[in-house]
C-alpha cells in the first residue's frame, strides 16, 4: 500500500508539472484528490489493515495528499500569474499617441505685465486705485497743474466729449481723485493701472487707446532718493536682479523736479545692443516729486507733505520684454498672438 | 533747436570739450540732445575756384566748358552742367581725387569729347538739404562772395566742418530757443562764463520819430513794441558765415536784411520783422485786434481772413502783418528796398497760439512767442539787428527807438533753505555746493545761515517756486549722485480690494476653462455702439473724432469681440474663444460723467473640443457656453441664486437665447448670434455672453461653512417624465426640488427624449434623484413617501406622466 501511495504521489506531481492551464490542473486535482480518486480508494482499503498499521498508513495518506495539494496550489498560482500577464500584454496601448488635450486660455500680455507690476507694488505696501476713463477736464488737467490754455492740453491731442468732459489722456486723474479722498492726510500709496486715450493715428508705435500704470506716494518726509530706491527695486524685480537705473532731468507739469528714468539694458547688460540702440540704457518711466500745486489742489499741505509719482506704459514694457514689434498687436486679438503668452 | 557747436563757442569757452561730450553733459543735466549731426556728409577735397573763362560746350547745348583757376598752377578745364555758371564767379570745385557725399569719387573724365578735370558743385552736391539752399542757387551752382580766396577750403567756408546739436526742448525750457539761452545753460553745466555779443550801434543825426510813430491798442496782447529805422540799405546776400550759420540752424538764407532778422531770432530768441518802410503806406504803426472779416495776404501769398481773436500790425488803416506769426506781402522787403523798419516786440502767447491754430501757420517766430520770450532782451535785440544792418547792408540807423512799453518786469525772488533742499532730495549737499550751482547758473542770490534768497533772471521764466530751485540744484548736482533709499514711513498693508481679487479669479477661471483674454477698443461707430447693450442709453459721441469708426463710446463689449472673431476667421483661425472685461459707457446727464460699468463678455465659435484619432469632436453650442458660466457662478458661490430665462434679444437667435438673472434681477445674457448678424460679421455659428460684472462681483456671498461629510447611505431614484414639449426642464426641476423637501439632496437631468416613441408634441425628461438624511439611514418607505409627493407635484403642475 505504501508503495502504491508513493507511486500515486509521484504520478500526481508529474501530471501537475505537466498541466499547462488551469483546466488541466483542475483535472489533475479531481483525478487524484476527488472522491472517486485513487487516494480515496486507498483510504477505503484501510479497513483491511491492522489497528497498529492504520494510524501509520493514515499519516502517510495525509502526507501524500498534502504534498499533492501544495503542488497544486503552487502550480495554480503560477498559471494564474501567467494568465494575468497574457491578458495585460493583450491590453497594451501606444503611449506615443497624443493625449486628450486640455483646452487652455491665458492672460492678454498687457494683463500679464500689469498684474506682475501690481503684485510687485502690493508687496511694497501699495493698494490699487481705479477711476473713470471718461473724466472731467478738472481731474485730467487742472488738478494736475495744467490750467486752461496750457499747450499740453490741445483739443487736437485729446478726445473731448464736451468742453468739460474727455477721455482721460493718462491715469493721473486717479491720483488727483485718490488724494482728494484722503482729505489732506497721508500716507497715500497707490498704483493706478488703466486704459487711456489720445488723439493719435494708429500705427506700429502709436495707438489711440493704450494702457498706463502710475504710482503715487504722499507722506511726510518722502524724498526724491526714495523715488530712486523704489524704482530701482521695481526695475530689479521686473527686469533682473543686477539692473541699475538712471535719472535724466525732464519736465512734466505735475511734478517738480521731473525725471525720465532709464533701466540698464536687460538684453546686453549695458554694453549696448539693438534693444537699447547701443546706449546701454532703456527709457521706461517718467517720474518726479509731486508738484506743490498738485498737492495743494488736492487738499495737502505742501509744506508738510511731499510725494513722488511715476508713470509707465505696459505696452512699451511688454514690447521690450517680449520683443513685440507693433503696438497694434495688443488690440487686434489675433489668437495666434494671444496664445503665445500661455506659459510661465 | 539746432545748436551749431562752432557758433556756440562765441559765447562760451568750449576748449577741451568735443561736441559729443558736450551733448552728453547737456543731456545729463536736463535737456535731451537728440542728435549730434556732423554737417560734412563725407565731402573732401573741395576748394574755391575762379571761373576764368566760360564758353558753350561744342557738342552739348546744356553744358559749359570752363577754365577754372583752383590755385594750383594753370587753370584747369571743367565741364559744368549748371545753367548759372558764368565767367568771373567764385565757385566750389571738387578737384580730381575729391570725394563728395555718398562716397562719390571725382575722376578725370571726358564729357561729350571734352576733358573735365573736376566738378563745379551745387550746395546739394556738397550735402546741404535742398530746402536750405538759397532760392537763387536752388537749380544751379552756389556762387561764393568775390573775396573768397582761390584754393581755400570751400567746406570750411560753408561751415561744413561744424557739428550741430539738436536739442529736444521740454515746454518749460523756452529760454533755450536762443543761442544766448543755450550759452547760459552750457556755462552753468561747465562752470564757465558767458560772453554776450557786443552791440556797437552808430546812429545818424536823424530822429526816428520823424519817420514813424507807434500806437498799441491791445496792450495785453502786446505789452512791448519797439522799432527802428535803417535807411539806405542795399539788399544783397548776407555774409557767407551768416548764411552758413542759418543753414546749420535749419533756416534758408534770403538776403542780408531778412537773414539778419533771422540771425537775431536765433541769437537772442527774439523774433524780429523787417518792413519795407516805403511800402508801409503811412508813417504810423497801429497794433490792434483784427476786425472780423478783415483780410491780409501773408508772405506766403495766401489770403487769410481774420477774426477779432487775431492780432495785427497795421499802417493805421490796413494790416501789414499778422502779429508774431508772419508779415504781409504788401510791406515785404524786396530787392529794391532802401529803408527798413525793424519791429522788435513782445506778443503774449495766447493771441499768437490762436492765430497759429486758426491759420495752421507755425513759424520760428510764432513758436517762440507761443512758448514765451524774454522781454528784457527785446530792445537789445533790436539794437543789435540795426547795428548788423548798418554793417552788412550798408545802412544808416536813424536816431532813437519808437516804442510803446507797458511791460512791467516782475522780479521773481525765491527763498529756500539748505535743509529743505536736502530734505526733498534725500541728499547731504553742502551750502557751498548750492552756492556754486547758483553762481554757475548766474542767478543773483544772498545766503544767510543756510537760507538762500534768489533773484531769478527774467530769461528763466520757468522758475518761480522752491521746487524749481530744488530741481536746478538737483540736475546740476547730478542725479547720478542721488542716493537710492526707500521711504521711511508707517507700514501700509498692500492688497487688492475684494472686488479686484474676485475679478482676477474670474479671469483665471475663464482662462482655465479655455478662453483667451482679449482687449478691444472702447471707441466704436454709431451703429455698433448700442448693439447688445444690457441697458439702453443715448450714444456718447466724441466732439472731434478722428474717424467715424472710432467716434462713439461702446455700450457692450460684444461687437468688438465679434470683430476679433471675424478678424481671426479671415486669417483661417476658425476656432475662437475670447473673453474680455472692460468698461461700457452709459450716458447720464449732458454735463455729467457717464455711468461707467464694468462688463464681462465672451465670444465662442468653431470646434470647442477635438481629439481626432479617438473620433471626438465637439463644436461650441449653447450648453458649452452655459456650462462655462455655470462654473463661473459656482466659483463665486452664486449658483443657487442664478436663473436662466428663455429670452428674445435683438441680434440674437430668438430660440437660443437666455437672460441670466441673479436673485431675480437680469444681470446678463447668453445666446447664439442671429444668423443675420452672423453673416454681417462673416462668422459661422457663434455664441456670445455678457454679464454686468459689478453686479456679479458685488453680490454678498457667505463665507464657506463646513458641512459634515455624509455618514449614512443615500438612496437613489430615477424618474422619466413625459410632458408637453414646451415645458422647460428648469421649471420641472424647480418643482421637483420644492416637492422633495429636506431629504432630496440632489436632482440631475440625465436624458431628454423627443421622437417616434412618444406622442406628437410630447417629450420625456429623465431625472436622477438622490435622497439623504445626515442624521440616519433612510428606510425605503420614507423615501417612497417623499418620492410619491414629488411625482404628484409634477403631475399636477405640468400634467406629467411617468414614462413606462
Image: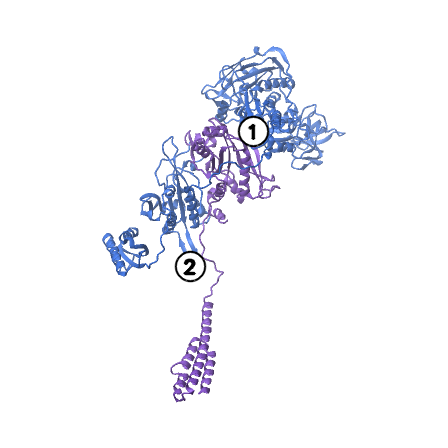
Chain colours: A purple, B blue
Instruction: Give the labeled residue for mark 1.
Output: B421
Q: Callout 1: 10 Å neighbours few (<14), some, many (20+)? A: many
Q: Quadrant of the N terminus of chain B?
A: top right
Q: Callout 2: 10 Å neighbours few (<14), some, many (20+)? A: few
- Quadrant hosting residue B443: top right
Instruction: Give the labeled residue for mark 2.
Output: B615
Q: Which residue lies furthest to the left in this view?
A: B796
Q: Is residue B135 left or right of residue B349?
A: right
Q: In this view, does B258 lie to the left or right of B680?
A: right
**Res B551 seen here:** yes
Q: Is residue B217 left or right of residue B45?
A: left
**Whole-percent x, y for residue B302 in the image:** 51, 24
Q: Quadrant of the C terminus of chain B?
A: bottom left
Foreground: A239 or A197? A239
Foreground: B318 or A98? A98
**Whole-percent x, y for residue B190 in the image:** 64, 29
- Quadrant hosting residue B677: top left
Q: Residue furthest front?
A: A52
Q: Is residue B749 above or below residue B676?
A: below
Amino acid at each position: 500500500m505504501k508503495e502504491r501511495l508513493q507511486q500515486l504521489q509521484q504520478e500526481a506531481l508529474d501530471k501537475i508539472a505537466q498541466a499547462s492551464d488551469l483546466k488541466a490542473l483542475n483535472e489533475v486535482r479531481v483525478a487524484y484528490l476527488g472522491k472517486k480518486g485513487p487516494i480515496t480508494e486507498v483510504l477505503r482499503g484501510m479497513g483491511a489493515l491492522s489497528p497498529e498499521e492504520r494510524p501509520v498508513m493514515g499519516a502517510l495518506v495525509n502526507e501524500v495528499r498534502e504534498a499533492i495539494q501544495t503542488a497544486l496550489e503552487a502550480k495554480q498560482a503560477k498559471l494564474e500569474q501567467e494568465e494575468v500577464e497574457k491578458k495585460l500584454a493583450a491590453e497594451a496601448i501606444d503611449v506615443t499617441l497624443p493625449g486628450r488635450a486640455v483646452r487652455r486660455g491665458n492672460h492678454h500680455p498687457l494683463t500679464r505685465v500689469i498684474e506682475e507690476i501690481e503684485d510687485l507694488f502690493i508687496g511694497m505696501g501699495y493698494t490699487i486705485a481705479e477711476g473713470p476713463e471718461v473724466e472731467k477736464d478738472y481731474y485730467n488737467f487742472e488738478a494736475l497743474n495744467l490750467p486752461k490754455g496750457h499747450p499740453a492740453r490741445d483739443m487736437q491731442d485729446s478726445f473731448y466729449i464736451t468742453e468739460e468732459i474727455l477721455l482721460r489722456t493718462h491715469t493721473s486723474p486717479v491720483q488727483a481723485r485718490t488724494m482728494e479722498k484722503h482729505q489732506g492726510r497721508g500716507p497715500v500709496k497707490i498704483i493706478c493701472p488703466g486704459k487711456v486715450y489720445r488723439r493719435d493715428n494708429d500705427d506700429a508705435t502709436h495707438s489711440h487707446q493704450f494702457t498706463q500704470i502710475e504710482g503715487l506716494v504722499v507722506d511726510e518726509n518722502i524724498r526724491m532718493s526714495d523715488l530712486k530706491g523704489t524704482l530701482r527695486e521695481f526695475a530689479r524685480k521686473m527686469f533682473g536682479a543686477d539692473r541699475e537705473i538712471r535719472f535724466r532731468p525732464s519736465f512734466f507739469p505735475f511734478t517738480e523736479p521731473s525725471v525720465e528714468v532709464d533701466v540698464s539694458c536687460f538684453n546686453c547688460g549695458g554694453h549696448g545692443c539693438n534693444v537699447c540702440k547701443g546706449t546701454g540704457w532703456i527709457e521706461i518711466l517718467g517720474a518726479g516729486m509731486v508738484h506743490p500745486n498738485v498737492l495743494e489742489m488736492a487738499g495737502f499741505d505742501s509744506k508738510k507733505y511731499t510725494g513722488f509719482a511715476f508713470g509707465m506704459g505696459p505696452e512699451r514694457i511688454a514690447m521690450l520684454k517680449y520683443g513685440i514689434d507693433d503696438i497694434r498687436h495688443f488690440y487686434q486679438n489675433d489668437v495666434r498672438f494671444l496664445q503665445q503668452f500661455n506659459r510661465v | 533747436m539746432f545748436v551749431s557747436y562752432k557758433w556756440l563757442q562765441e559765447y562760451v569757452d568750449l576748449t577741451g570739450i568735443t561736441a559729443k561730450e558736450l551733448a552728453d553733459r547737456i543731456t545729463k543735466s536736463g535737456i535731451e540732445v537728440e542728435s549730434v549731426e556732423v554737417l560734412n556728409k563725407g565731402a573732401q577735397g573741395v576748394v574755391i575756384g575762379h571761373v576764368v573763362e566760360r564758353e558753350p560746350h561744342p557738342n552739348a547745348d546744356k553744358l559749359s566748358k570752363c577754365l577754372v583757376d583752383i590755385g594750383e598752377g594753370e587753370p584747369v578745364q571743367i565741364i559744368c552742367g549748371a545753367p548759372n555758371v558764368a565767367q568771373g564767379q567764385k565757385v566750389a570745385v571738387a578737384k580730381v581725387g575729391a570725394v563728395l557725399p555718398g562716397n562719390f569719387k571725382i575722376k578725370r573724365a571726358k564729357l561729350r569729347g571734352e576733358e573735365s578735370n573736376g566738378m563745379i558743385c551745387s550746395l546739394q552736391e556738397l550735402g546741404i538739404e535742398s530746402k536750405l539752399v538759397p532760392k537763387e542757387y536752388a537749380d544751379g551752382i552756389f556762387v561764393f562772395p568775390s573775396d573768397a580766396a582761390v584754393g581755400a577750403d570751400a567746406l570750411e567756408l560753408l561751415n561744413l566742418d561744424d557739428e550741430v546739436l539738436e536739442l529736444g526742448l521740454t515746454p518749460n525750457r523756452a529760454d533755450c530757443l536762443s543761442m544766448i539761452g543755450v550759452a547760459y545753460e552750457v556755462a552753468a553745466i561747465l562752470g564757465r562764463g558767458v560772453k554776450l555779443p557786443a552791440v556797437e550801434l552808430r546812429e545818424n543825426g536823424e530822429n526816428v520819430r520823424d519817420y514813424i510813430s507807434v500806437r498799441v491798442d491791445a496792450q495785453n496782447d502786446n505789452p512791448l513794441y519797439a522799432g527802428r529805422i535803417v535807411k539806405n540799405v542795399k539788399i544783397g546776400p548776407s555774409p557767407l558765415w551768416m548764411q552758413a550759420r542759418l543753414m546749420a540752424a535749419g533756416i534758408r538764407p534770403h538776403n542780408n536784411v531778412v537773414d539778419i532778422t533771422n540771425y537775431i531770432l536765433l541769437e537772442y530768441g527774439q523774433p524780429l520783422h523787417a518792413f519795407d518802410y516805403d511800402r508801409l503806406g503811412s508813417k504810423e504803426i497801429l497794433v490792434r485786434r483784427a476786425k472780423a472779416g478783415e483780410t491780409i495776404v501773408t508772405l506766403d501769398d495766401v489770403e487769410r481772413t481774420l477774426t477779432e481773436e487775431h492780432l495785427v500790425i497795421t499802417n493805421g488803416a490796413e494790416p501789414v502783418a499778422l502779429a508774431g506769426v508772419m508779415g504781409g506781402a504788401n510791406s515785404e522787403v524786396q530787392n529794391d528796398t532802401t529803408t527798413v523798419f525793424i519791429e522788435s516786440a513782445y506778443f503774449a502767447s495766447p493771441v499768437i497760439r490762436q492765430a497759429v491754430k486758426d491759420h495752421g501757420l507755425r513759424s520760428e517766430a510764432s513758436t517762440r512767442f507761443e512758448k514765451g520770450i524774454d522781454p528784457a532782451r527785446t530792445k537789445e535785440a533790436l539794437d543789435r539787428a540795426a547795428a548788423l544792418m548798418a554793417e552788412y547792408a550798408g545802412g544808416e540807423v536813424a536816431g532813437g527807438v519808437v516804442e510803446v512799453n507797458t511791460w512791467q518786469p516782475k522780479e521773481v525772488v525765491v527763498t529756500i533753505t539748505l535743509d529743505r533742499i536736502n530734505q526733498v532730495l534725500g541728499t547731504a549737499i553742502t551750502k557751498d555746493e548750492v552756492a556754486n550751482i547758483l553762481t554757475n547758473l548766474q542767478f543773483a542770490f544772498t545766503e544767510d545761515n543756510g537760507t538762500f534768497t534768489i533773484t531769478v533772471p527774467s530769461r528763466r521764466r520757468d522758475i518761480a517756486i522752491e521746487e524749481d530751485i530744488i530741481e536746478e540744484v538737483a540736475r546740476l548736482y547730478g542725479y547720478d549722485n542721488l542716493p537710492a533709499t526707500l521711504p521711511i514711513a508707517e507700514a501700509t498693508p498692500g492688497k487688492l480690494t475684494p472686488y479686484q481679487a474676485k475679478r482676477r479669479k474670474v479671469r483665471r477661471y475663464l482662462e482655465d476653462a479655455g478662453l483667451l483674454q482679449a482687449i478691444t477698443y472702447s471707441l466704436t461707430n454709431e451703429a455698433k455702439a448700442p448693439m447688445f447693450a444690457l441697458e439702453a442709453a443715448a450714444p456718447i459721441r466724441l466732439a472731434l473724432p478722428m474717424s467715424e469708426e472710432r467716434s462713439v463710446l461702446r455700450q457692450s463689449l460684444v461687437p468688438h469681440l465679434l470683430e476679433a472673431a471675424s478678424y481671426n476667421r479671415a486669417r483661417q483661425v476658425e476656432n475662437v474663444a475670447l473673453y474680455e472685461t472692460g468698461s461700457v459707457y452709459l450716458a447720464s446727464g449732458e454735463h455729467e460723467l457717464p455711468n461707467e460699468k464694468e462688463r464681462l463678455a465672451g465670444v465662442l465659435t468653431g470646434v470647442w473640443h477635438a481629439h481626432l484619432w479617438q473620433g471626438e469632436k465637439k463644436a461650441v453650442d449653447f450648453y458649452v457656453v452655459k456650462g462655462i458660466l455655470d462654473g463661473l457662478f459656482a466659483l463665486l458661490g452664486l449658483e443657487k441664486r442664478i436663473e436662466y430665462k428663455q429670452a428674445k434679444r435683438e441680434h440674437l437667435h430668438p430660440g437660443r437665447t437666455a437672460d441670466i438673472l441673479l436673485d431675480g434681477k437680469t444681470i446678463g445674457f447668453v445666446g447664439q448670434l442671429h444668423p443675420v448678424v452672423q453673416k454681417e460679421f462673416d462668422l459661422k455659428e457663434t455664441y456670445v455672453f455678457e454679464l454686468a460684472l459689478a453686479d456679479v462681483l458685488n453680490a454678498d456671498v457667505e463665507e464657506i461653512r463646513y458641512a459634515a461629510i455624509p455618514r449614512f447611505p443615500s438612496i437613489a431614484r430615477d424618474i422619466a417624465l413625459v410632458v408637453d414639449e414646451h415645458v422647460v426642464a428648469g421649471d420641472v426641476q424647480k418643482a421637483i426640488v420644492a416637492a422633495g423637501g429636506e431629504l432630496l439632496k440632489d436632482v440631475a437631468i440625465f436624458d431628454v427624449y423627443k421622437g417616434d416613441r412618444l406622442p406628437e408634441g410630447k417629450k420625456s425628461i429623465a431625472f436622477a434623484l438622490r435622497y439623504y438624511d445626515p442624521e440616519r439611514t433612510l428606510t425605503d418607505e420614507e423615501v417612497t413617501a417623499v418620492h410619491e409627493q414629488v411625482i404628484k407635484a409634477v403631475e399636477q403642475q405640468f400634467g406629467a406622466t411617468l414614462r413606462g
